[in-house]
């Protein structure tokens, strides 16, 4: 499966390279766009769950790396200032 990284900047200024085992993230996020923290979490939750299920369909087990990434995103989101925006900076194959 083609995997990818998507690079984001959190409202507190921290940058993070996030992992997806599938290119499905491109269907939910756009480089250069900013999203409210809760919207970003919802979009990545949907995308990473789809990606994990694609791995399950192909290999017979969910992708723990996608689910771990989602957990990191959810944890980071809780630390962000209210009303903040997450910027998707780039996609990297």
Image (spheres, rainbow, N blue to C red):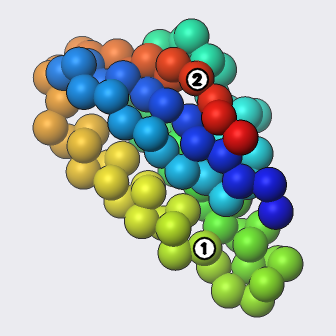
Q: Earlier in the sequence, mark 2 or mark 1?
A: 1
Residue 64's x, y, as percent?
52, 75
Q: Is residue 48 visible?
A: yes
Please give left or right for residue 41 compared with residue 59 in the image.
left
Residue drawn at the location 34% of the way across and 16% of the way down: 85
Q: Check the picture and name the quadrant holding the C terminus.
A: top right
Where, by quadrant of the figure, is residue 33 drawn?
top right
Residue topped by disc 2: 90
Helix, strand or loop under label 1: loop
Q: Residue furthest bottom?
A: 60
Residue drawn at the location 68% of the way across and 86% of the way down: 61
Instruction: Kindly identify which numbered label has been placed on residue 78.
Output: none
Helix, strand or loop under label 2: strand
The local crowd at label 2, few if under 14, some if 14 to 19, many if 20 or more residues have their Cα within 10 Å, is some
Please give left or right for residue 28 compared with residue 16 in the image.
right
| 77 up-or-down from 45: above or below | above
**What distance separates the C-alpha of mark 2 from that of mark 1?**
23 Å
């Amino acid at each position: 499966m083609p995997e990818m990284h998507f690079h984001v900047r959190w409202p507190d200024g921290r940058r993070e390279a996030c992992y997806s085992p599938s290119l499905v993230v491109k269907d939910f996020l756009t480089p250069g766009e900013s999203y409210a923290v809760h919207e970003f979490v919802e979009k990545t939750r949907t995308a990473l769950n789809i990606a994990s299920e694609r791995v399950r369909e192909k290999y017979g087990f969910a992708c723990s790396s996608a689910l771990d990434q989602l957990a990191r995103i959810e944890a980071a989101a809780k630390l962000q200032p209210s009303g903040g925006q997450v910027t998707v900076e780039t996609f990297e194959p």
